């Protein structure tokens, strides 16, 4: 990931000014370690708590540096109790269906649109670009009231297709612009060559462009899935017994008194696993996707 | 290159429709399920609509919600809380992210792993961030009070005190979003012209001078864009506050998004909630236009 900019190699012959390296390196290593630990500690606490029973979690006299704070006998009881709950399993399935289907639809529609915006000039291009660029940042809470009424009017509140439609719509503006950044980097000569060989625009797109922007699709897909999988406020308003998703169920378990922390954390771990896995597998693409538009522009 | 045009012009009728075939599905869905609700939010802010009735039965109320909104102390207090929250988290995240990006600029062992670990908090559900930090700040169960006890401070009721609750929410946001600033600025630093920095070093600039007089000015466009992107997101925060404090105690953490939700679904005043959401929308749209003026992906594509 880290490569020296070309300019530095050109200057390689120039003698460098020696600097005190050792202490700097040590300090930077220390900074790296401290920030890494601060970053991981809350997640560690969530994982650890999900393997504890209530008596292990409630330690009125435990201090941070005591043995009992760090050492415990792990139990799968919380996961068992969560996963034998038929309702919870249904909400988990709902989240999976909504997340996967809306991600696939968003990617398919967005990549087509991004390609047209990047490669063709046509009437309406300006309007579509600007509308989608502005829709990209609309706070979801602004949609809560109208969507509550409209979805009811259309008879798709408390249905999975209703949620899928909504998440696809709010994700498309974002996905278009992540993918646009990747498509703009594909050398246009390749498409021109395909066109010369007689390929239709659609064939050129699917056979030439799509394979080249696979990293972009991965990055956009993860970001889009993350929104659909994690979304809370719209799901809270739109869903009821039937189509409830995991974030809504978790929030329902956080009450003012007597939160069952072990169970709640087990739910938290279950909902955190897919995004964490994707991030660990594709951190490089995600960072490229995050910085593509703003930094290279 | 030269032969690129003819095959397309042979199929002229298809060619003119082709771009539209590509953009049509995305445009339709966006228009129906995103743009249409946003426009309805604008319309409903002029309508009297109570919860429990179909939205088609809402009656026209004129601009009364907007005249009420500007005099409503609850809205004003919520707006101030939002501004204070946004300013605090964004300033803290920018400073922390910039320091980290500068300190970890040079390649070193463990940096790739660190960056992967560092972006995890921004990928997990805001709901999970909220519940994790609510647990950490819990008076009896929380790790933070366990640490406080060890340090001899004793137990603090973090989420029951207005100021401390605000602080707790701020900490959670900083934990989640500082990595974003770091990633953006680190990428920006890598894209700087190395020759200029090398020239400064040859001219005898100390590392400190190189940062202040060379790197920061060159980095400024990316700093500004990152700052605006963070501001936009800070105005969109909801879940972490919803879970950690629910806007309380009192209304000490009741940011606008929380206030809109409560007005609509606890207060049942859907029209008034729409009017407040127009206020929030205006702030965010203003910031978005600023970002687009500074770094427009449209023009970036043209250059390529």
Image (tube, rainbow, N blue to C red):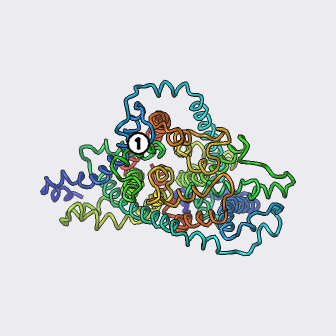
Residue occupying image coordinates x 35% and y 48%: B33
Work out whether residue B204 can be spotted.
Answer: no
Asked which quadrant contains residue A82, the reply is bottom right
At which x and y percent is residue B6?
A: 15, 57
At which x and y percent is residue A278?
A: 51, 67
Viewer-side residue, B219 vs B70: B70
Query: Which residue is at the far front?
Result: B52
Q: Which residue, given by chain and number where applicable, does mark 1 sit on?
A: A146
Task: Say which element carries label 1.
Answer: helix
Residue occupying image coordinates x 72% and y 54%: B138
> Dot 1: few (<14), some (14–19), or many (≥20) neighbours within 10 Å?
many
Describe residue B247's horizontal placement relative to residue B2 as left or right: right
The mark total stands at 1
At which x and y percent is residue B101?
A: 62, 53
Viewer-side residue, B37 vs B301: B37
Describe residue B58's horizontal placement relative to residue A259 as left or right: left
Q: Chain of mark 1?
A: A
Residue occupying image coordinates x 60% and y 58%: A253
Work out whether residue B165 can be spotted.
Answer: yes
Asked which quadrant contains residue A194, the reply is bottom left
Residue occupying image coordinates x 42% and y 32%: B48
Describe residue B137's horizontal placement relative to residue A192 as left or right: right
Position of the N terminus of chain A, as image quadrant, is bottom right
Viewer-side residue, A90 vs B278: A90
At which x and y percent is residue B287?
A: 49, 38
Viewer-side residue, B25 vs A217: B25
């Amino acid at each position: 990931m880290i490569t020296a900019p070309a300019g530095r190699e050109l200057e390689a012959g120039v003698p460098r000014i020696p600097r005190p390296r050792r202490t700097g390196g040590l300090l930077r290593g220390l900074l790296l370690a401290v920030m890494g630990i601060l970053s991981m500690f809350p997640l560690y606490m969530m994982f650890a708590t999900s393997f504890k029973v209530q008596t292990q979690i409630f330690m009125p006299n435990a201090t941070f540096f005591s043995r009992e704070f760090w050492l415990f006998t792990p139990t799968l009881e919380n996961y068992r109790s969560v996963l034998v709950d038929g309702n919870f399993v249904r909400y988990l399935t709902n989240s999976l269906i909504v997340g996967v289907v809306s991600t696939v639809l968003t990617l398919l529609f967005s990549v087509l649109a991004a390609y047209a915006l990047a490669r063709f000039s046509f009437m309406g291009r300006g309007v579509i670009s600007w509308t989608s660029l502005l829709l990209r940042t609309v706070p979801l809470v602004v949609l809560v009231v109208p969507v509550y009424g409209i979805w009811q009017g259309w008879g798709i509140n408390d249905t999975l297709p209703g949620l899928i439609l909504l998440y696809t719509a709010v994700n498309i503006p974002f996905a278009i612009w992540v993918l646009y950044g990747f498509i703009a980097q594909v050398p246009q000569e390749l498409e021109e060559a395909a066109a010369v060989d007689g390929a239709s625009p659609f064939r050129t797109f699917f056979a030439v462009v799509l394979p080249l922007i696979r990293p972009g699709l991965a990055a956009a897909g993860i970001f889009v899935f993350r929104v659909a999988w994690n979304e809370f406020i719209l799901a809270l308003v739109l869903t009821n017994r039937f189509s409830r998703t995991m974030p809504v169920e978790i929030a329902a378990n956080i009450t003012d008194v007597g939160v069952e922390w072990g169970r709640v954390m087990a739910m938290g771990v279950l909902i955190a696993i897919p995004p964490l896995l994707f991030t660990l597998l594709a951190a490089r693409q995600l960072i490229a996707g995050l910085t593509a538009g703003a930094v290279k522009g | 290159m030269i032969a690129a045009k003819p095959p397309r012009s042979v199929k002229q009728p298809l060619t003119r429709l082709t771009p539209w075939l590509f953009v049509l599905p995305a445009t339709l869905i966006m228009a129906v399920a995103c743009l249409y609700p946003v426009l309805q939010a604008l319309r409903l802010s002029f309508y009297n609509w109570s919860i429990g009735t179909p939205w088609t039965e809402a009656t026209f109320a004129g601009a009364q919600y907007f005249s009420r909104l500007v005099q409503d102390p609850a809205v004003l207090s919520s707006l101030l809380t939002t501004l204070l929250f946004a300013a605090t988290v964004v300033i803290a995240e920018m400073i922390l992210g910039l320091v980290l990006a500068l300190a970890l600029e040079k390649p070193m062992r463990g940096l790739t792993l660190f960056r992967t670990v560092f972006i995890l908090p921004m990928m997990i559900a805001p709901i999970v961030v909220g519940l994790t930090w609510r647990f950490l700040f819990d008076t009896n169960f929380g790790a933070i009070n366990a640490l406080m006890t060890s340090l001899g401070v004793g137990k603090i009721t973090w989420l029951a005190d207005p100021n401390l609750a605000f602080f707790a929410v701020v900490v959670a946001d900083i934990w989640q979003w500082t990595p974003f600033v770091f990633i953006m600025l680190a990428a920006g630093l890598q894209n700087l012209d190395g020759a200029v920095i090398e020239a400064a070093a040859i001219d005898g600039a100390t590392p400190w001078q190189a940062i202040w007089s060379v790197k920061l000015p060159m980095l400024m466009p990316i700093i500004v864009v990152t700052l605006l992107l963070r501001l936009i997101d800070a105005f969109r925060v909801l879940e972490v506050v919803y879970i950690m404090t629910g806007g309380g105690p009192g209304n000490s953490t009741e940011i606008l998004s929380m206030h809109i939700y409560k007005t609509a679904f606890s207060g049942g005043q859907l029209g008034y909630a729409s009017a407040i959401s127009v206020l929030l929308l205006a702030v965010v749209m203003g910031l978005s236009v600023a970002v687009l003026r500074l770094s427009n992906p449209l023009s970036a594509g043209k250059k390529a």
